[in-house]
Image (cartoon, rainbow, N blue to C red):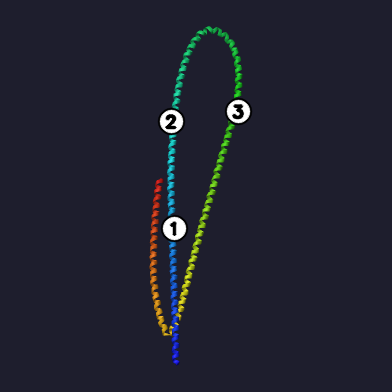
Amino acid sequence: MQRETSTARDKDARTVKRGGIAKRTEKRKEEEEERRRRRKKEEEERRRKKKKEEQERRRRKKKKEEKKKEEEERRKERKKRRKKEERRRKKKKKKEEEKKERRKEEERKKEEKKKKERRRERRKKKKKKRRRKEKKKKRKKKKKEEEERRKKEEEERRKKKEEEEEEEEEKKEEERRKKKKKERKRRKKKERRRKKEEEEEKRKKEERRRKKKEERKKKKKKERKKKKKKEKEEEKRRRKKEKKKKRKKKKERRKKKKKEERKKEEERREEEKKKRRKKKKKKKNRKKKKKREEEKKERRRREERKRRRKKRKKEEKKKKEKEKKEKKKKEEERKKKEEERKKERRKKKKKKKKKKY
């Protein structure tokens, strides 16, 4: 009777223990599932981050290309303006030369006209002179004839006339002196007025020159101030941008660090849990055979998981290496393109220099 009761009790204990082991295995499975989900989430997070970085890189690249395009357009515009300016200058030069030519031609015509006029004048004078000579001869002849007739009368008149003439001469002389005096006064007055006007003109010119000079100075000062102000504003904006970038980077680093720390903490806790479990299992395995068998099964499962983990790690490693290679390849292509652009720029610069000279 006693033996039967003890065996029944043992049987009941065994069933209870078996139920406890099943619960623990179920719990382990759930934890494993939880870890898998977490890893998957982290993987997705990494992929999302990578995608974001790629988008950012493309955006920067696009911006750079747009900037380059704008620069090229500005350069073409400058070239156009220079050409236009050159054409305008040539046109102006040509006009001026034509103007000079016309002026020369007009002067030449005027000179010819003057020469003709002088020649005509000389002919007139010669003609006049000839006529005068002829008249003179005639007058002389006539005079000679009348001279003798008048000689006697003339002699008498002459005496009378001489006296009158002397008086008249004195009067005239007096008038001339007066006139001269008057004329001198008038000239002096005129000279003084002229000098005064000249001085006034000179003073006005000087005043205008001085005003212009002051205006130029003011203008230059104003421009300098404007330029300085602009530069200061530019510097301020640039500093602000840099600060913003730095803050952003700092924030990202801090975030990353926190994430890594959380991850490490979780792994450490996980490791500790594993250790605790192992200890418990060892104690229980020493106690009973059934427990050892269950442990063997558990080890097999663990090995299977390890094998799967190793396999997964290998695949991840391969994937990472592949990504590395692709990244390297892209970087090399970018460098190559950059080198080609530099060469192209150098060639353009050389061409420009040749054109200038």
Q: Which amino acid does label 1 sit on?
A: Arg
Query: Tag on residue 284?
Result: none
Q: Residues within 10 Å of mark 2 (few under 14, many from 20)?
A: few
Q: Do the residues labelled 2 and 3 touch (CB within 8 Å)?
A: no
Q: Which of marks 2 and 1 is in front?
A: 1
- Does residue 40 sit above or below 9 in this rendering? above
Q: Do the residues labelled 3 and 1 touch (CB within 8 Å)?
A: no
Q: What residue type is labelled 3?
A: Lys
- Does residue 291 sit above or below 45 in this rendering? below
Q: Residue at x 44, y 91 (%)?
A: 4
Of 226 and 210, the residue lying toward us: 226
Numbered marks: total: 3
Left or right of 22 in this view: 163: right
Q: Quadrant of residue 104?
A: top left
Q: In which quarter of the image is residue 153?
A: top right
Expressed as whole percent of the image width and height from the top left, the position of residue 93 reads 44, 38
- Asked if one can make out residue 281 in the rendered structure from this viewpoint, the answer is no
Q: Name the residue under label 1.
A: 59
Which is nearer the N-term, disc 2 or disc 1? 1
Q: Residue at x 48, y 68 (%)?
A: 259
Q: Mark 2 points at which residue?
A: 105
Which is nearer the N-term, disc 3 or disc 1? 1
Of 257 and 287, the residue lying toward us: 287
| SS at circle 1 | helix
Q: Quadrant of the N terminus?
A: bottom left
Query: Tag on residue 189?
Result: 3
Expressed as whole percent of the image width and height from the top left, the position of residue 254 reads 50, 66
Q: Residues within 10 Å of mark 1 (few under 14, many from 20)?
A: few
Q: Residue at x 43, y 49 (%)?
A: 73
Q: Which amino acid does label 2 sit on?
A: Glu
| SS at circle 3 | helix
